[in-house]
Image (tube, helix red, strand yellow):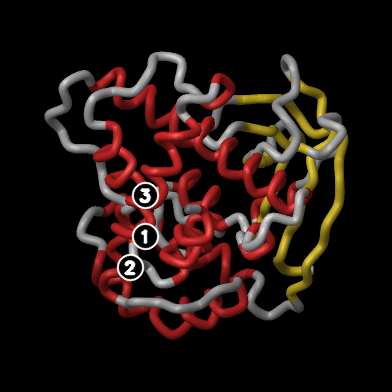
Amino acid sequence: KLPATEAALADGEVEVAATELAEFAEVVFETAPFRPDRGLPAPWKGTLYQWLGGFDLPPALVDPGAEIEFLQDGIVFRLVWAVEAVRVQGIAEGVPGAADIQGNIALALTYGVPSIPAILLAQAGLPSRAMIRRLMEQFPATFADAAGMRDWLRDRAEHASDLWAAGGERQIWRDFLARWREGSGTNWTTTSREIACVWAEVSPPPDTPVRLVHDPKLGTTGVYRMDLTRLGTLAAPLPEVDSGVVRAAVSADAAHVAISRFGPS
């Protein structure tokens, strides 16, 4: 199921990706570590489709609290954990096709967007799923890395400004473009490192994806779950996480955070 989902995401086929993931989820949700705390709400497959497609949840829900909890606990945390656990285990055991899964499924579920270009825009700091969906609908994209995204943004930045009717969206777009234009004249490199983390409680399992948010006032870099639940603080601040494309996950020893960043030097 996961290789088929990965291929569907690469082709932007959200319905296929959601169908494959729903079948995968039916199995893993029966396993104790990945079973949502409050079970599965009746329309959970619809919630999965709405989230993966970048759509807002429908306003009339049978139980909004249960739906939102399932989204945060069942999809963004447990299903992401299951996908990454199966991927890592498959690679370790040499399962055919496991090495072809690049981690995009976990990122799509984390950010709630349906394609690799959409994932990169979300990672780059565009915070609105609705804005990302509108961009992809108006300007279909095929870029697969940050360099391609930068070229795509440069060519479409002014045209895309016409998409934002609300003043808040226009400001978000201007701020987003400004951050990327600041680094457009510098060399971009990929760096990888592990930094110790001071966990607020027990550390998450190895390979759990996390978000890094730097607080310039305090001079600290926080570590969060993908739903922005705080997990801890990096032992050494890393202000550059606010620029470029950053991927982070709990390290194998669970004492560090493994960080990969593609961005201005």
Q: Position of residue 202 (x, y in %)?
A: 74, 16
Disc number for residue 52? 3
Instruction: Provide the residue designation for mark 1.
Output: 132
Instruction: Indicate the secondary structure of the residue bearing disc 3.
Output: helix
Q: CA distance from mark 1 to mark 2?
A: 5 Å
Q: Residue furthest left?
A: 60
Instruction: Indicate the secondary structure of the residue bearing disc 1.
Output: helix
Q: Kindly identify the residue that appears in the image at 44 percent across and 49 percent down.
A: 127
Question: In the rendered view, would you say 155 is above or below 231?
Answer: below
Instruction: Provide the residue designation for mark 2.
Output: 135
Residue type at the position of mark 1: Ile
Q: Position of residue 218 (x, y in %)?
A: 73, 31
Q: Position of residue 93 (x, y in %)?
A: 76, 49
Tell me, yes or no, whether the two marked residues, 1 and 2, touch with CB atoms within 8 Å: yes
Q: Kindly identify the residue that appears in the image at 40 percent across and 77 percent down.
A: 141
Question: In the rendered view, would you say 108 is above or below 34?
Answer: below
In which quadrant of the rendered image does the C terminus lie? Answer: bottom right
241 sits left or right of 42 in the view: right
Q: Quadrant of residue 8?
A: bottom left
Residue type at the position of mark 3: Leu
Of the pair 19 and 238, the residue shown nearer to us: 19
